[in-house]
Amino acid sequence: MSITPEKEPLLPRIQVENIVKSIKKGERIDGRGLTDYRPIEVILNPITKASGSSLVKLGGTQVIAGVKLELEEPFPDRPGEGVLQVHAEFVPLASPSFEPGPPDENAIEVARVIDRSLRESKAVKLDALAIEPGKIAWSVYTDIYLVDHQGNIIDTSMLASMLALATSRIPELIKGENGYKVDHTKYVGPLPINTLVATVTMGIYNDVIIVDPLLEEEAVIDSFITIAIDESGRICGIQKRGMKGFSRSILDNAVEIALSKGRELVDLMKKILNNPSEYMKPLVLE
């Protein structure tokens, strides 16, 4: 299995010193404020054969997410619900450090953070996806593909996944003598969504918090925290990375920032979903 280095890329010392100096001064090497996101671009439904899909560009980071619905037996402890599964893959062309092979521990972490954020917020109405309780239900597969890595994979993947789910449609079912057959060429309605969810990832260097860290900043920063926020302003997931800890006051500040920036991301998703035709265009990977 390929292993993605924890610190990438390897930076010249003078560049590291420049990044640290900028952070200490409350500045960013790309000119952003400490809590500013890079520009966000979205294409809805670039994968025509998927039930729903999206391409999200967060600065130079690009992620494609696709959703497919299949019929399966529900979990024994949740017979009246459908199943939600999230998978992530870091495509080798996204970074020189990515290699072909099974998803590494970093891709697995991204998938688990997004999966947990969706489940804890009950973003998808799984209880509306049971066809015959205890026997057959819809399984919702969300596949995430990182195609260009320039930092902050989690937030980009969360936006792509949530938009793909929110634009997904349920295929038509045909019931015959031998059970159900899925017709993926016809759809009966949208995937039922309870709430939109966004994640806000922050890097922490000493007592300074920066939102949406660049790849170069990630190579310098020791601690990261990702906080998931739903459209009601509820925290539905927290993930910390890095060996270095931080104080309670820093955590409190990070939560306040996440609530504010999470609301901005949710509002952006609402704008996109309310005007879908403006975000449907040919897919061009740069």
Image (spheres, rainbow, N blue to C red):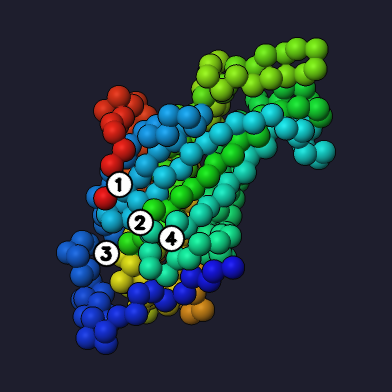
For the residues labelled 3 and 4, the Cα–Cα distance comes to 30 Å
Q: Kindly report which numbered mark, 2 or 3, lies closer to the viewer in this rendering.
A: 2
For the residues labelled 1 and 4, the Cα–Cα distance comes to 14 Å
Q: Which of the marked residues, 1 or 4, is nearer the chain's N terminus?
A: 4
Task: Check contact, mark 2 vs mark 1: CB within 8 A.
Answer: yes
The quadrant holding residue 258 is: bottom left
Residue at the bottom extreme of this rendering: 13
In the displayed structure, would residue 120 be above or below residue 137? below
Q: Looking at the picture, how far across and down is residue 206, in whole percent?
A: 37, 79
Q: Residue at x 69, y 29 (%)?
A: 71
Asked whether the viewer can see residue 149, the reply is yes
- Residue 85 tag number: none
Q: Which of the marked residues, 2 or 1, is nearer the chain's N terminus?
A: 2
Q: Badge 2: how crowded within 10 Å, few (<14), some, or many (20+)?
A: many
- Residue 92 tag number: 4
The quadrant holding residue 202 is: bottom left
- Residue 34 tag number: 3
Going by the numbered disc 2, the residue's amino acid type is: Asp
Towards the viewer: 69 or 265: 69
Q: Looking at the picture, how far across and down is residue 243, in whole percent?
A: 51, 79
Q: Kindly report which numbered mark, 1 or 3, lies closer to the viewer in this rendering.
A: 1
Q: Which residue is mark 1?
A: 285
Q: Badge 1: how crowded within 10 Å, few (<14), some, or many (20+)?
A: few
